[in-house]
Image (cartoon, rainbow, N blue to C red):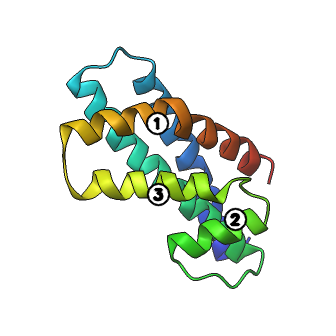
Amino acid sequence: MGQFRERFELARTQYGQALERLHEAADLDETMIVRDAMIQRFEFTYELAWKSMFYWMKDQGEQVPEMQKPIIQNAFRCQMISDPKLWEDIKDCRDETSHTYNENKAVEVVAFVRGTALAAFDVFRQRIDSL
């Protein structure tokens, strides 16, 4: 097994665990603490998603830089994801929450995670579990 395949397998496993933790938080009634936990879990779930994309593509011989935007575009081309715009929106949300804290933005992000990102993460998990 090559180094990128090993990294992909580790990232895929960790992604599944992170996604389960995110679902656990999403199943709770929203409080400030739950909201903060969801944002943190959303951030590391997203990080493991794009790293899984990257390592899988590198293992397949793709020449893609370790930069999120090109990885998302290539993941679409490689049929790992079906909506690159949605994944760019997920990336933008993640970027906003990791650099500052604003309560109104936190409420918006959690609503986005519950209403949109979780479903995209679940579909991605099914896809990478079949690789």
Position of the C terminus, as image quadrant, is bottom right
Q: Is residue 115 above or below residue 50?
A: above
| Residue in the image at 74% along x and 53% along y | 82
Circle number at residue 113: 1
For label 2, count other residues whose C-alpha is less than 10 Å away and answer few (under 14), some (14-19) or many (20+).
many
The amino acid marked with disc number 3 is Lys
- Dot 1 falls on a residue whose secondary structure is helix
The amino acid marked with disc number 2 is Ala
- Dot 3 falls on a residue whose secondary structure is helix
Q: Position of residue 79 (x, y in %)?
A: 79, 60
Q: Badge 3 is on which residue? A: 91
The amino acid marked with disc number 1 is Val
| Residue in the image at 48% along x and 47% along y | 45
Position of the N terminus, as image quadrant, is bottom right
Q: Is residue 69 above or below residue 96?
A: below
Q: Earlier in the sequence, mark 3 or mark 1?
A: 3
- Residue 81: quarter of image: bottom right
Dots 3, 2 in contact, CB < 8 A? no
- Residue 73: quarter of image: bottom right
Circle number at residue 16: none
- Dot 2 falls on a residue whose secondary structure is helix
Q: Badge 2 is on which residue? A: 75
| Left or right of 47 in this view: 103 | left
For label 1, count other residues whose C-alpha is less than 10 Å away and answer few (under 14), some (14-19) or many (20+).
many
- Find the distance from the CA under tag 3 to the CA under tag 1: 12 Å
